[in-house]
Image (spheres, rainbow, N blue to C red):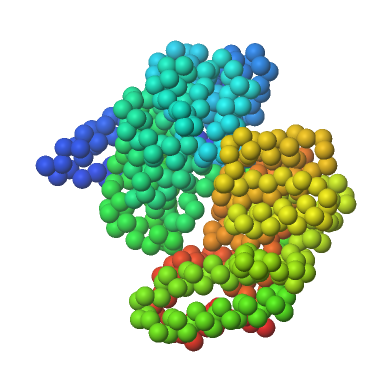
């Protein structure tokens, strides 16, 4: 049996045993129980640590029979997941987007099933758009494992459990049917795109933490999207109490966005035992992955857009001036939204009046030049926007200009409609060079390597979300270099947001949180057109 090579990360080499940050007040029985449980787990970790390495496990028989091969780092990843279960620790597999977290997870489940480990059901929770993908991947890699998708009006959890080893469901249904899920003693709970529980106080997070299971796994390429408190929420789901309660954690790490080096090191050492992360940028991991290039495409507003933009600013500032400074937050958010819509397309801001496409969006005129070049060289492109209505507008424009039925995916579509559109783009031999997707519905989990171009029609607050979307194309299976085009309207709120992101400053913290400290003139300077 092979062991992990020096090129792989051995998480236990970095482990520094910190005492669990769990309160031991005499009247807090849960804390005492959590403390004992953690100490037992930590003693197991010590035993694993003495081996100085994790053994490569043999591939599950079903993988061998179906001629499924894993890359070295994936074989280590599935071996690590199995090892973490054996020592009783929750595992955070945080590999970069596109490195195959799904196949590593399925391999670990198949291995446990073949070894006779765990007789209970396994629950996998994922965004609704990814449920069919999980089902397909199980059929492809481990067809001997029975899978049921729990969804639809006639859903029946008892039936799903009785007829399968793995139950797939969405975060929405987990939240809606929480009592049913919490009654089950699951063998394992796996959260895909686990950043969905990054908010410690959100209902979905609380429901997930209340589930009963022998082991827990979280999968995400972005364990920290906005702040280190995202990481606390994930870790507290996996190993309750390991990082203390949230109040203690905030006291230990008071600045959620900027930590001094010694605090970063302390936090990293604390979480390394149950976190595994590999990056596509590491040449040892994926030496053959094509390059990804990002291009900022600067756009201008049309005359008509400028007039509407400035009128919105003046009206909003007049309203803010009439309110107390502490009441401006909601108005600022509303202003952000309206200006971003105007930057995209006047038809998005004002759906009542249909504007001529030639005057309603300078950004669209630039966009058409890009997609036309892509179509002429017979390449394909993913087009992301944060607005469902903008996605529909782009589809209508492309349909008219290129006399085609452009594939589209957004949150208002049924699961069957989404799967059809994905298959039409990814597997069809027909000439469908464009795929329009809403950022929320299509930005995670999908494999869309037929495209080697990605266009971000508008900017999201968090660049990690855009990176996730871009990596629908830049992932294993991509054979061409990927170009990411980011459309930014010059001298507008879009460009100012882009500059803030570039400087790695938290947008909400630097702008929205301090709106009551800003004068009307300072707000005018930020939102008004410049240049």
Query: Can you say whether 497 is above or below 418 in the image?
Result: below
> x, y percentage for residue 206?
33, 43
The answer to which image quadrant residue 311 occupies is bottom right
> x, y percentage for residue 85?
41, 26
Which residue is located at x 59 percent, y 13 percent? 61
> x, y percentage for residue 470?
65, 50
Which residue is located at x 80 percent, y 55 percent? 400
Query: Can you say whether 131 is above or below 377 in the image?
Result: above
Position of 217 compared to 288: left or right? left
User: Farthest bottom residue?
Assistant: 521
Q: Nearer the viewer, residue 334 or 426?
A: 334
Q: Nearer the viewer, residue 34 or 125?
A: 125
Q: Nearer the viewer, residue 488 or 26?
A: 488
Which residue is located at x 61 percent, y 77 percent? 309
Position of 429 compared to 126: left or right? right
The N terminus sits in image quarter: top right
The answer to which image quadrant residue 484 occupies is bottom right
Which residue is located at x 66 percent, y 54 percent? 392
Can residue 260 be seen in this snapshot?
A: yes
Query: Can you say whether 419 is above or below 516 in the image?
Result: above
The C terminus sits in image quarter: bottom right
Q: Nearer the viewer, residue 236 or 51?
A: 236
């Amino acid at each position: 049996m092979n062991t992990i090579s020096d090129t792989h990360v051995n998480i236990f080499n970095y482990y520094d045993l910190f005492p669990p940050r769990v309160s031991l007040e005499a009247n807090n029985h849960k804390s005492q129980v959590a403390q004992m449980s953690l100490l037992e787990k930590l003693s197991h970790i010590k035993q694993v640590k003495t081996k100085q390495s994790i053994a490569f496990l043999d591939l599950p028989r079903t993988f061998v029979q179906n001629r499924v091969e894993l890359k070295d780092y994936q074989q280590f990843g599935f071996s690590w997941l199995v090892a973490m279960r054996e020592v009783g620790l929750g595992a955070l597999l945080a590999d970069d987007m596109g490195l195959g977290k799904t196949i590593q997870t399925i391999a670990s489940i198949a291995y446990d099933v073949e070894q006779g480990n765990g007789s209970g059901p396994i629950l996998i929770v994922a965004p609704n758009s990814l449920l069919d993908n999980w089902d397909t991947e199980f059929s492809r890699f481990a067809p001997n494992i029975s899978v049921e998708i729990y969804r639809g009006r006639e859903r029946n959890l008892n039936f799903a459990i009785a007829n399968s080893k793995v139950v797939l469901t969405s975060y929405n249904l987990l939240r809606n049917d929480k009592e049913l899920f919490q009654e089950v003693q699951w063998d394992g709970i796996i959260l895909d795109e686990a950043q969905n529980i990054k908010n410690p106080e959100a209902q979905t997070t609380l429901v997930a933490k209340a589930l009963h299971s022998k082991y827990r796994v979280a999968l995400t390429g972005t364990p920290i999207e906005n702040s280190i408190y995202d990481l606390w929420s994930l870790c507290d789901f996996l190993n309750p109490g390991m990082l203390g309660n949230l109040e203690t954690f905030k006291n230990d790490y008071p600045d959620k966005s900027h930590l001094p080096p010694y605090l970063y090191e302390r936090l990293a050492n604390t979480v390394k035992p149950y976190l595994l992360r590999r990056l596509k940028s590491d040449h040892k991991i994926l030496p053959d992955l094509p390059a990804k290039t990002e291009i900022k495409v600067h756009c201008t507003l049309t005359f008509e857009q400028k007039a509407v933009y400035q009128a919105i600013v003046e009206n909003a500032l007049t309203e803010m001036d009439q309110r107390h400074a502490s009441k401006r937050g909601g108005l600022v958010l509303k202003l952000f939204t309206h200006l971003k819509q105007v930057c995209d397309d006047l038809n998005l801001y004002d759906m009542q009046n249909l504007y001529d496409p030639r005057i309603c969006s300078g950004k669209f005129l630039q966009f058409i030049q890009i997609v036309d070049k892509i179509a002429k060289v017979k390449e394909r492109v993913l087009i992301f926007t944060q607005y469902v209505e903008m996605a529909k507008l782009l589809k209508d424009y492309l349909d008219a200009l290129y006399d085609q039925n452009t594939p589209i995916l957004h949150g208002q579509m049924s699961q069957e409609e989404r799967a059809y559109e994905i298959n039409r783009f990814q597997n069809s031999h027909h000439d469908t060079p464009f795929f329009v997707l809403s950022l929320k519905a299509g930005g995670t989990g999908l494999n869309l390597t037929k495209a080697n171009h990605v266009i971000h029609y508008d900017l999201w607050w968090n660049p990690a979300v855009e990176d996730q979307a871009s990596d629908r194309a830049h992932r294993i299976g991509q054979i061409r270099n990927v170009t990411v085009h980011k459309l930014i309207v010059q001298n507008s709120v879009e460009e100012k947001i882009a500059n803030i992101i570039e400087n790695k400053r938290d947008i909400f913290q630097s702008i929205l949180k301090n709106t009551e400290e800003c004068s009307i003139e300072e707000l005018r300077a930020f939102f008004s057109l410049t240049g």
